[in-house]
Image (cartoon, helix red, strand yellow):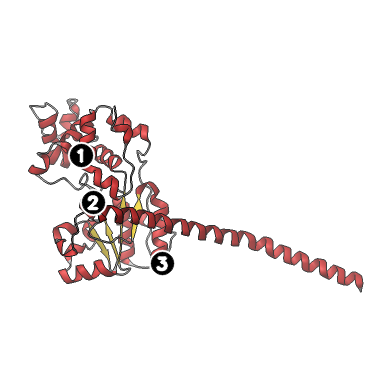
Amino acid sequence: MALCRGLLRLLSYGLLISSILIMLPYYGWDISQQLRAKKMLQVQEERKQVMRDFCENEKKLHLEYLRSSMLQNFIVDDAHGLIYCSIPKVASSNLKRLMFILGKGEPFDDPRQITGYIHNKLPLLSMFSRTEIKAKLKHYTKFMFVRDPFVRLISAYRDKFGRQNEPFYKTHGQNILRLYGNVTRLPRTMDQAFALGIHITFYNFIQYLVDPLTEKRVPFEPHWRQMHRLCHPCLIQYDFIGHQETLQEDVEHLLNILKVPSNIQIPSSYHNLTFTDSVESFFQTVPLKDRIKLYKLYESDFKVFGYRMPDELLKE
C-alpha cells in the first residue's frame, strides 16, 4: 500500500510539473504582451505630451478656424469611428489601404493585395457638413503617422525628381530647372531631360523650398508641405501618433486599440533613409546657410513631433 501511495504521489507531482511546464510559455507570452502594451501606451503618452507642450506656446485657435480646404487629407471610417490624417511620404499609400479594408468591414481583406489608386474611394472629412465634421472630430479616434522631416524631404525628392515622373516635371520640375538649374532651353519632357543629362539636383530642390518667393507663387505641394500644416495638431486633439520609423509595431498597437484583428498586415514600406550618414550624403552639396534656412522652414515639424534637431547638418 505504501508503495502504491508513493507511486501515486510521484505521478501527481509529475502531472503538476508537466502542467506548469506547459503553462509557462503561455503565461510568459502573456506577460510579455502586457509589458509591450504598457510600453506602447507610454510611448504614445510621451509623443502626445511633446505635442501638447509645443502647442501650449502656440497661438490658441479654435476648431471653428478649420475650413473644408484644410481637411483634404482627413480620411473617415464611420464603421470604427476613425479619422486618419494622411501625410504624403509617410507610408500614406499603405495606411490608405488599411483604411480601405477597415471601411469595407469584416471579413477583412488583405491590404497587401490591394493595388491601384484608391484615394478617390475613401470618404474624406471635408465631404461632410460642418455639424458632422465637428461631431466626428469630437467623438472619433483620430490618428496620424509622421516621419523625420528631412528624411521625408529626401524621399519626396527621390520619388518626384530623382526618377522619371512626368506630372511633377511639368508642374514643378521645369520651374526648378529654370530658376535654380541654369537651364535656359527646357526639355519638354523628363524623358528628354534625362536623355540630355539634365537632372534636378537635390540642392536645386532645396533652393526651391527655401526661396521665400516659392510660396508666394503657389502653396507648397503636399508631398513637401510641413506635416503640421497638413494635420493641424494644435487644433485637433489626436488620440494616436505613429512614426514611420516604428511603423509595423505602431500599426499593430493601433489595431489593438480599435479592437480589430491585430494580425492584419500592411505592406512593408521601402527601405527608409534613417541613418545619419545617408542623410548627410544628400546634404553634402547643400551650403550651410541653406541647411539652416531649411531647418527654420521645418522647425515646427521637428519640435511638435519630437524629432531631434539635426545638429550634424547645421554646424560647420
| Label 1 neighbour load within 10 Å: few <14, some 14-19, many 20+ | some
How far from the left and from the top, in percent, is residue 309?
31, 40
Q: Closer to the N terminus: mark 1 or mark 2? A: 1
Q: Nearer the viewer, mark 1 or mark 3?
A: 3
Secondary-structure class at tag 2: helix
Which residue is label 1 attached to?
A: 165
Q: Return the x and y of residue 256 as percentages of the image width and height.
A: 42, 63
Number of residues whose C-alpha sits closer than 10 Å to that of mark 3, classed few (under 14), some (14–19) or many (20 or more): few
Is residue 209 at all visible to an observer of this figure?
yes
Residue visible at 43% across and 57% down in the picture: 42
In-front residue for pair 35/182: 35
In which quadrant of the rendered view does residue 192 lie?
top left
Disc 2 crowd, CA 10 A, few/some/many (<14, 14-19, 20+): some
Instruction: Give the camera-side residue of 271 and 279.
Output: 279
Q: Is residue 33 left or right of residue 120?
A: right
The spot of residue 89 in percent (x, y) is 27, 46
- Viewer-closest of 226 and 247: 226
Residue to which mark 2 is pinned: 228
What is the C-alpha distance between the residues marked 1 and 3?
40 Å
Mark 1: which amino acid?
A: Asn
- Taking 3 as reference, is 114 left or right? left
Cβ atoms at labels 3 and 2 below 8 Å apart: no
Contact (CB < 8 A) between labels 1 and 3? no
Q: CA distance from mark 3 to mark 2?
A: 28 Å
Amino acid at the residue labelled 2: His
Q: Which residue matches tag 3? A: 259
